Amino acid sequence: MSELNDQRIDSIMKLAMSEALQGGKFKDFISELLPAVCNCLSASQVSFWLFRKEKDEFESIHSFDAETKKSSTGEAFEKGSFSEFIKTLKAQQFTYADNSDDSSQMEEFVVDYLLRNRLRSWAGMQVWNDNRLFGIVTAEWKGKKDFSNQDRMMLLTASTMISQCYDALLRLKEDFLHRNEVSSLKGEEKEKEKLAKKLADHAFYTSHSIRHPLATILALIDLIKLNWESRETYEELLQQLKIETMNLDDAIRVMTAKIELD
């Protein structure tokens, strides 16, 4: 793996230690993440679109433009505008479009979005949370973009981090409600609630800190299967697999220490 690729991957992975991510400050973390992804992918713009199931559309809650260095919100991929393309986004983990594509499901999106905005290439990676489609991370380019495995990994890592941050936000809300409930209890009931809180904390740590490296490991295994015949790519992916396995081992050690301390 080249030094440049190492630096690009490191810049994304460092966000795993972000206070906004760990603290569930969702909008703050998105503001940190998207510029980093935009820089790593050399994209014109990177966005996060929240999937509104009740409206069957993807709504942009944050976009970062590389040229202006500014953010914007409020757009939407509405079902009525891109019906076939919306179906594709919901069905595929990774979606890629280029203005030279001639497939029927891409045609309306290419004409009405890429060409209208003078774009050449576009890509999106699904974000899942609690076993449901939560949104999509997208990137777009004014020139031709040939996707590498590292580019896919960056989008996949970004989507996993977004899900983690939302988990942390939900956990903060749950903690707030729980503290209010415990404050009204006395004696034995309060001790039972404290024990339940510790168990909930351990369960949260397991899903929050262990799920990320585990999800990345599973994605890397899939990529290795797809690139089995390319020795260079295979070695790169194997090295990244080793790193993520070590990250998972560290997370398990921390969890074990927390249990012993409690």
Image (spheres, rainbow, N blue to C red):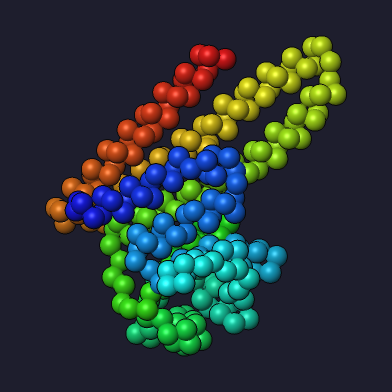
Quarter the C terminus occupies = top right
- In the rendered image, which quarter is residue 37 located in? bottom left
Does 206 sit above or below residue 86?
above
Instruction: Pinpoint residue 146: horizontal percent, then vertical percent.
Output: 28, 70
Does 209 sit above or below residue 139?
above
Does 71 sit above or below residue 79?
above
| Residue sticking out furthest to the top | 187
Does 177 sit above or below residue 262?
below
- In the rendered image, which quarter is residue 140 located in? bottom left
Residue beneath the point at 45% across and 40% down: 17
Tell me if I can see residue 15 in this picture.
yes
Residue beneath the point at 44% across and 46% down: 15
Q: Nearer the viewer, residue 251 or 47?
A: 47
| Residue sticking out furthest to the left | 231
Instruction: Pinpoint residue 44: horizontal percent, then vertical percent.
Output: 41, 72
Q: Nearer the viewer, residue 68 or 230?
A: 68
Horizontally, residue 181 falls left or right of residue 51, namely right
Tell me if I can see residue 215 in this picture.
no
Instruction: Pinpoint residue 236: horizontal percent, then vertical percent.
Output: 21, 49
Horizontally, residue 205 falls left or right of residue 67, namely right
Number of callouts: 0
Residue beneath the point at 28% across and 51% down: 7
Residue beneath the point at 53% across and 56% down: 31
